[in-house]
Image (cartoon, helix red, strand yellow):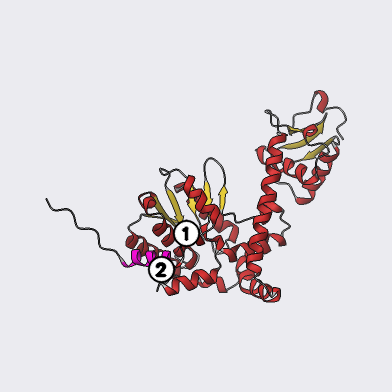
Amino acid sequence: MTSPKPKKTTRWQAAAEHLAELIPVSQLHPAVVAWTEAASSRTPWGCGFSGGADSLALLLLVWAHWPKRRRLLRVLHFDHRLRGAESRADARFCRTVCAGLDVPLLEGKWPGKHPDASEAEARAVRMAFFAEHARIVWLGHQQDDIAETMLMRLARGSGSSGLSAPRPVHRISRGRVHVRPLLSLKKVELLTALRSAGIRWREDSSNELGVFFRNRIRRDVVPAWTEAAQRDALAGAARSRMLLEEDDQALESWLDELRPLTPAGDLELGTIAGKPRALVRRALHRWLLAEPRAGRISSQGFESLLSAVMAAKPTRQSLGRDGFAVICADRMRFERKGRQSSGNFKRGIN
């Protein structure tokens, strides 16, 4: 009986192996490499793939460096339908690459027309598609993205949680994880490796238009900022992101130990009394996120409520159309509109 002939290596498989020689596992983010060693071998991996340089490098490296995972690899491409024929060409390119690698491609499209869609809206619908098809999602963010994200979030006044994004291993909820192995590499390093391996990718022409905030930061701000720094500003931003993540994790762990939320969903102020404002701020954020009936709150409204929590001041503050945050007797709870407080919560409310 003759044994079956081994499959012939395709052009894209050879390209992936070549790229893996130029970018070995040792150059990928160590947190991601450590995560892969402990990750379940039975959980499928989803790999976000737009056809651009970053996501192409990501897909090829994941395919080459983790061969035992290929049978559980799912490539995810989402067409926002914002660039007409160019978007359709991106999808065709992704199909060609996946066929060459012999991995399945799952495609999604944004129904309807969205000519005025914001960057946040486009990202939200794309990430929803990814979450629908995979709990573990690999993303192609690299070191330049750290600087861009940090500058964008500084503009809106983010704290350590926001400024520590994008994280190499981001555990979200219900076993969902986003992993970003390229955060240890600069964009220019990826492009150099792709060119050295003779690999072509798709270019998004909208990146040069400056329609979205990130595109303007990438095109106009980051080059001037790095030149003015006269040092490796991208590596500096990456280190700051890492330190901010450590601080963020420390505060979250401290808050976990205090357990300020009661089983009924109240915020027990005695557990956070006298604690640093940063910790109380997180406790308030956690309470708001855990309360599904709470509406959106402005920055000014949040700061006002935070001051009341810090002082344990009797308060009744609106949280949208459905109810109020009520502070009394060393606790804060959500009170539905039309339902008057009773007992200790009734006394002393302004």
Q: Which mark is residue 142?
A: none
* Main secondary structure found in the magenta portion: helix
The secondary structure type at the circle numbered 1 is: helix
Q: Dot 2, crowdedness within 10 Å: few (<14), some or many (≥20)? A: some
Q: Is residue 13 magenta?
A: yes
Q: How many marks?
A: 2
Three-letter amino acid code of the residue under disc 1:
Val
Q: Nearer the viewer, residue 96 or 167?
A: 167
Residue picked out by circle 1? 25
Distance in Å between CA atoms under marks 2 and 1: 31 Å
Q: Is residue 262 magenta?
A: no
> Is 228 situated above or below 251?
below
Residue picked out by circle 2? 89
Tell me where the magenta segment starts and ends, as one range. Answer: 11-21
Q: Quadrant of residue 277?
A: top right
Residue drawn at x 81%, y 23% is 343
Please provide percent x and percent y for residue 116: 58, 63
- Mark 2 and mark 1 in contact? Answer it, CB < 8 Å: no
Three-letter amino acid code of the residue under disc 2:
Ala
Q: Quadrant of residue 211?
A: bottom right
The secondary structure type at the circle numbered 2 is: helix
Please provide percent x and percent y for residue 249: 66, 46
Residue drawn at x 79%, y 50% is 300
Residue drawn at x 71%, y 40% is 254
Q: Is residue 153 left or right of residue 57?
A: right
Q: Nearer the viewer, residue 334 or 138?
A: 138
Please provide percent x and percent y for residue 198: 40, 74
Q: Quadrant of residue 67?
A: bottom left
Q: Quadrant of the C terminus?
A: top right
> Is 157 situated above or below 133?
below
> Is 329 situated above or below 242?
above
